[in-house]
Image: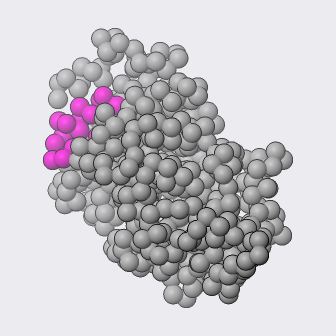
Amino acid sequence: MPYSTKLGSRVYRFDDLRSLLAKATSERSGDVLAGISASSAEERAAAQMALADLPLKVFLEDFVLPYEKDEVTRVIVDGLDYGAFAEVSSLSVGGFREWLLSDATGPGDIARVSPGLMPEMVAAVSKIMRTQDLVTAARKARVTTAFRDTIGLPGRLSVRLQPNHPTDDPRGIVASTIDGLFYGAGDAVIGINPASDSIEAVSRLLSTLDEIISTYEIPTQSCVLSHVTTTIRAIEKGLPVDLVFQSIAGTQKANESFGINAALLREAMDAGLSLRRGTAGNNVMYFETGQGSALSAGASFGIDQQTIEARCYGLARAYKPLLVNSVVGFIGPEYLYDGKQIMRAAFEDHFCGKILGLPMGVDICYTNHAWADQDDMDLLLIALAAAGVTYVMGVPGSDDIMLNYQSTSFHDALNVRKLFGLRPAPEFEDWMKRNGIVDEGLSPLPIARTNRLLTGAQGR
């Protein structure tokens, strides 16, 4: 159905909900590339005004992708808790913004309403928010998950230790892992992007990580970020799989380009649960997303990339993941051109994920051909820490030598923990103290004072 609003003497008309959402979105290169971005700042403002007045109930009737034609829409709609939605059902998008930002609305209120929210509702409200609104509202949302340690508790910031190696060399992976552990990284997951997705390569990496975790009795989880079908094969072979990983997208067609569907994800989740390797909880799934993937697959259907990204989160929550993160600047400047666009997208993604009930992290990153630098990432890391981000990446030297992109380092994560008085997951923190890695203030101790962790690493 069409939508319209008057701005000054001019009436702006938008053909359908997809067009309205796209025109209301902050400018980003992917939407310009797709030909759906607002043609001027005035048109964008008009779309935001029309969107602010739109009742939330409209999103339950006017789907951006039809229920009968798109599996992601079906997963989202079938999983909605309409009783939870009732609390905010009388609000417009603008009214929902005011509700989220109200001092009277706390973490419990957001958690209660979250299961009844369509991703498009949350995407819509993010489009009429300033950055400080996105930070303030996201900070209120608290999502806790667990496997061998507990992620997302107040006052905590977890870190994925990312010891990637261009040839999957176990010696390089072990060296990077030990380095990261000394800086307090790894409580979210020790996760490797394999250079090869073969079952043989994945088997070696799984065994290497399992040996590190079991030998040093580290209360964390490992993950080899292979395709979900490879992970299922690994589980069938009896290999030590902790978390099941998959990149996901916000439309059925885009997920088909990844070689996945909802049934396959459910099969993988059930396979992971069958191993019963968690000790603190049973959240076994790990999802990664990123704005632009549907457009690059020719599967965006005229929907702006930020709305499609929010739909990823609607799909993800059906599988109760331990971790979800937006790899925000990884795809490249064709979709997020510069530091300003990357930062805005990161705030939106983090906000949408948290409000939809996900343990949301952000890979604060950029590719070397984007108009961005590490100063942009420093600002983004600090602001996301203020926003209560669940976890960030820990990459040796902030330079991933296998994936060839720039992220955040072990030092960066340690510094932001100190700046905000944040701590690792409690089980992991206790382990670091017992092993003489950090003092009571979580400052790393001199390497010469550490015990069997260093001795064991030197013996490899």
Q: Which residue is nearer to you in this view: 245 or 133? A: 133
Q: Which residue is nearer to you in this view: 234 or 384? A: 384
Q: Is residue 4 left or right of residue 410?
A: right
Q: Which residue is nearer to you in this view: 438 or 362? A: 362
Magenta residues, start to end: 161-180
Q: Is residue 190 left or right of residue 310?
A: left
Task: Report the residue that reaches farthest toward the front.
Answer: 9
Q: At 77% from the left edge and 71% from the top edge, which residue is drawn? A: 8
Q: At 16% from the left edge and 42% from the top edge, which residue is drawn? A: 169
Q: Is residue 190 visible?
A: no
Q: At 73% from the left edge and 68% from the top edge, which residue is drawn? A: 49
Q: Which corner quadrant holds the C terminus?
A: top left
Q: Which residue is nearer to you in this view: 98 or 429? A: 98
Q: Which corner quadrant holds the N terminus?
A: bottom right
Above-or-below relation of 66 to 230 = below
Image-quadrant location for residue 43: bottom right
Q: How is the image coloured?
A: one colour
Q: Is residue 254 left or right of residue 21?
A: left
At which x and y percent is residue 270?
Answer: 44, 64
Q: Is residue 297 visible?
A: yes
Q: At 63% from the left edge and 48% from the top edge, which residue is drawn? A: 131
At which x and y percent is residue 110?
Answer: 72, 54
At which x and y percent is residue 230?
Answer: 27, 63
Residue 178 covered by magenta stretch: yes
At which x and y percent is residue 51?
Answer: 71, 70
Residue 320 covered by magenta stretch: no
